[in-house]
Image (cartoon, rainbow, N blue to C red):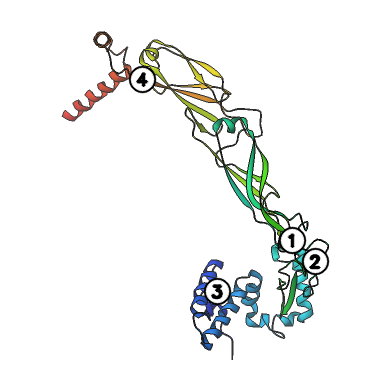
Amino acid sequence: MAKQDYYELLGVSQSASADEIKKAYRKMAMKYHPDRNPDDAEAEARFKEVSEAYEVLKDDQKRAAYDRYGHAAFEEGGAGAGAGGAGFGGGFADIFEEMFGEAMGGRRSRRGTGRGADLRYNMEITLEEAFAGKQSSIRVPTSVTCEACDGDGAEPGTEPTACPTCRGAGKVRAQQGFFTIERTCPTCAGMGRVISNPCKACSGAGRVRQEKSLQVTIPAGVDDGTRIRLAGEGEAGMRGAAPGDLYIFLSVKPHRFFSREGADIYCKVPVPMTKAALGGSVDVPTIDGSRAKVTVPAGSQPGTQFRLKGKGMSLLRSNQRGDMYVQLQVEIPVSLTKQQKQLLEEFDGEGSGEKSHPETHGFFSKVKEFFEDLKD
C-alpha cells in the first residue's frame, strides 16, 4: 500500500512554513494521541504516521530530500539510496558535519551537552550611579559545581565510565536510505559517560543548589535597559559541562530633578516672574554633584532654554560627556498682598503696550483681523 503524502497527512501545502507545519502536527497529534484514544488501533497508527511526517518535514535537509525524491529518499534502494547506497549516505553526513558543525547538528561537543542555564538578574540603579558607574555586590541563587565530586557526578574515589551504547560519543547513528540520522544516546543522555556509583552530595548531577556572591562593575554612562553579560557565571553544567551565562538587566530610577535623553540631561528650573522680567542669575544642580550659575537675561520667556556644554551624562566607554539643558519655568505669584496687587495694576496700566508684551499684542491683533475678515 502506497504511503500517503506527508503534506496531505498534516493537512498543509508544500509551501507551508515551519510554524504552520508545527501547528498542524500539534493539532493532529492531539487528535490521534493514544492517551486520548485508548484501545483504538486505527488512531494509534494514524498518530505514528503524522509523527513520521513531522520528523521529516520539520528538518530542512530531510524536507528538501523528500520534496525531490518523495518517500524513496528514506528507503533502501530508492532514489535517494540509489545515488550511492548506504555507504555514501554515511559519508554525506560526515561532509555536512565538517562543513557546518553544530549548525547542522553534527560534531556537537560533549561539553555542550547538559550546558548550564543562562540566568537573569534585574538591578535598579540611580541616575547618579549611571553617570559615575559603580561596583556592586550581588547574591544569585544558582547551581554551582559540586565540590565533593569536582563536578563529574561520581562518588569520590570512583570515576564515570564510557557509555557502552555510544562508546563515549554521546550520540548514536542510524541509517535511513539517503541519510545517516544522528540522535542523542538514550543511555547516557548525550554525556558519553555513565555513573555506577553516584556522588551522595549531588546525587550524580555534578552540581548543587547554592547562593553565589558576585562583584559586578557597572560602567559609567549606562542607560536604562542596558544588559551586562557575565560569561560563565550562570548555572553550572551537568557533570562538568560548560556553565551558562549571567545577564544583568539595568533599570534607572526616575530622578527628582533631571530627565535624560541619551547623553543629555534636562532640568526644569522655576524662576519668579520678576527675575524673568528684570534679569538675574540662578544656581542649578548638575549630575556630578556640583552647581552651575545660569544668567537669566531680562525679558526671558517661559520655556527659554540654556545649554551647559559638557555637563550632561558620561558617554559609555568614553571620557566625554553630553550636555545639560536648563529650561525656565516662569512662576506667576499667588496669594498677593493688597500692596502687591496695587503695584501690578499700576504696571498693567502703564506697561501693557506692544513694547512690553509683543506676543500678546501680536496675537490679539491677528484675532481682530480674523473677525474683520469674517465680516467682509
Residue hosting label 4: 331
Q: Which mark is residue 310?
A: none
Judge from the rendering whether residue 14 lies leftward or rightward of residue 112; answer left or right. left
How far is disc 3 from disc 4 in space, using C-alphas?
A: 70 Å
Q: Amino acid at mark 4?
A: Glu
Q: Nearer the viewer, residue 279 or 204?
A: 204
Q: Which of marks 3 and 1 precedes in the sequence?
A: 3
User: Which corner quadrant of the image does residue 191 belong to?
Assistant: bottom right
Query: Is residue 109 at all visible to an observer of this figure?
Result: no
Of badges 3 and 2, the one in the foreground is: 2
Density class for disc 3 (Cα within 10 Å; few <14, some 14-19, many ≥20) is few
Q: Nearer the viewer, residue 353 or 234?
A: 234
Q: Which mark is residue 160?
A: 2
Q: Amino acid at mark 2?
A: Pro
Q: Which of marks 2 and 3 precedes in the sequence?
A: 3
Of badges 4 and 1, the one in the foreground is: 1
Residue hosting label 3: 14
Task: Tell me the element at label 4.
Answer: strand
Residue under the image location 52 percent in, 72 percent down: 26
